[in-house]
Amino acid sequence: MSKKIGDVILDVQNISLAFGGVKALTDISFNVREHEVRAIIGPNGAGKSSMLNCINGVYTPQQGSITFRGKTFKHMDSHEVAKMGVARTFQNLALFKGMSVLDNIMSGRNLRIKSNIFMQALRWGPAEREENEHRQKVEEIIDFLEIQAYRKTPVGQLPYGLQKRVDLGRALAMEPQVLLLDEPMAGMNIEEKQDMCRFVLDVNDEFGTTVVLIEHDMGVVMDISDRVVVLDYGKKIGDGTPSEVRASPEVIKAYLGTGH
């Protein structure tokens, strides 16, 4: 059964970003539709992470705008972006290594906690009920990601592939509408990659979450993406379905070099 791709949820228009005299992104435009897996690919230094950093408010572009659910922003504020329903994983894991898997994923619920710090500390009345509800949600994510056996284990003791899974779990704990994944499969072996592919597709399918994905492994991109945008030296050189992008002479040149 083919999934139903919805309307445009995220629209990036004419984004340019420079650091000093160095141009990281030049006049980039593309959109993301609800419920799709949208890949951003390109060689090292193409500007992929910079693009995600503009979307989730870490960087402020000098030009252009980003429209999310019909509201247009010149600059995305990272806290506001999270509240609007955009979650992000990072290339370099930013997990709390000494804390358990459960507590790391629980930290992703912070934006949804309504009771104040004092009530939380006392675990009083509504705060206790609320914490129990959040814990229930976190347990569901732990089950979904098949990491029940490690729920009490400090994250720093886990192998890399499982740490990446915890990172995904923390982002899912925010219950995002759009999930930004920055190289979720980097450094993984084939088996770990297959697992992560399955989880990304399940998140997209079962939760209906829209996924924007940076990935170097072209096999993975071609397997799981609905549409692909290609960057090279901060410019857009391709945009379309995986088969369209794969057949583009400009994309082939950027990946393989002119000598091939």
Image (tube, rainbow, N blue to C red):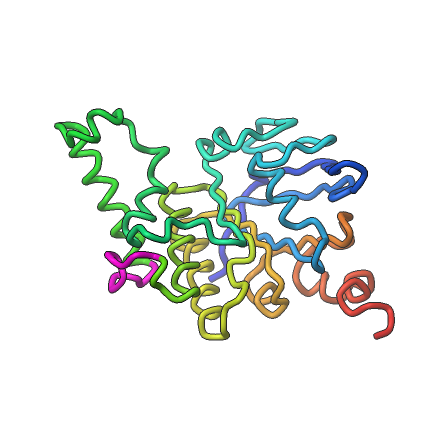
Residue 249: x and y in percent read: 82, 64
Does 93 appear above or below 68?
A: below
Q: Which residue is at 43% across, 68% downward?
A: 195
Most common secondary structure along the magenta stretch: loop
Q: Quadrant of residue 227?
A: bottom right
- The answer to whether residue 108 is left or right of residue 260 is left
Residue 120: x and y in percent read: 21, 30
> Residue placed farthest to the right in the image?
259
- The answer to whether residue 151 is left or right of residue 220 is left
Query: Camera-side residue: 1 or 167?
Result: 167
In magenta segment, residue 148: yes
In magenta segment, residue 83: no
Does 132 appear above or below 225?
A: above
Residue 70: x and y in percent read: 57, 29
> Residue placed farthest to the left in the image?
125
Query: Camera-side residue: 212 or 183?
Result: 183
Q: Which residue is at 27% across, 59% downward?
A: 153
The mark tally for this picture is: 0
The segment highlighted magenta reads 145-155
Q: Quadrant of residue 155?
A: bottom left
Q: Which residue is at 60% across, 70% downward?
A: 219
Check the picture and name the quadrant holding the C terminus: bottom right
Residue 95: x and y in percent read: 41, 50
Does 60 appear above or below 248?
A: above
- The answer to whether residue 143 is left or right of residue 72 is left
